[in-house]
């Protein structure tokens, strides 16, 4: 038993799952225009504010890890030997 799910090995299945995933994301963004919001701060009332905020935060984290943290912890290939 390999422990891997055979469902995710098929490229056709992965394509279908990705399409379902992206369609659900688009559906959620469209749905956000019709949901009544009760914002505490004015910027929370913008359509899809939290989705945009989460995406931007994720991109900032990836860029910080790549350009700031990686040079700090990176060692030469023969560091231990």
Image (cartoon, grey):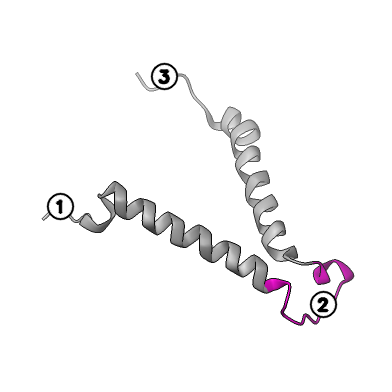
Verify CB contact (< 8 Å) between mark 1 and mark 3: no
The residue that appears at 52% across and 66% down in the rendered structure is: 24
Q: Is residue 63 above or below residue 54?
A: above
Let me know if residue 34 is in the magenta part. yes
Badge 2 or badge 1: first in the primary sequence:
1
> Which residue in the structure is indicated by mark 2?
39
Q: Quadrant of the N terminus?
A: bottom left
Give the quadrant of the C terminus. Answer: top left
Instruction: Classify mark 2: residues with Cα within 10 Å, few (<14), some (14-19) or many (20+).
Output: few
Q: Which numbered dot is residue 77?
A: 3
Label drawn at residue 2: 1
Secondary element under disc 1, as helix, strand or loop, is loop
Q: Is residue 23 left or right of residue 11?
A: right
Q: Position of residue 30 (x, y in %)?
A: 66, 68
Which marked residue is nearer to the observer: mark 2 or mark 1?
2
Asked whether residue 60 is in view, the answer is yes
Q: Quadrant of residue 6?
A: bottom left
Instruction: Report the magenta stretch's main SS.
Output: loop
Nearest to the observer: residue 72 or residue 2: 2
**In this orientation, does residue 5 appear?**
no
Element type where label 3 sits in the image: loop
Residue at position x 68%, y 45% in the image: 60
């Amino acid at each position: 038993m390999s422990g891997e799910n055979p469902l995710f090995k098929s490229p056709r299945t992965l394509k279908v799952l990705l399409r379902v995933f992206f369609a659900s994301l688009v559906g959620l963004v469209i749905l956000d225009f019709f949901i009544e919001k009760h914002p505490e701060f004015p910027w929370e009332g913008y359509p899809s504010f939290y989705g945009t905020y989460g995406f931007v935060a994720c991109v900032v984290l990836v860029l910080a890890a790549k350009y700031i943290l990686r040079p700090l912890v990176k060692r030469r290939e023969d560091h231990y030997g």
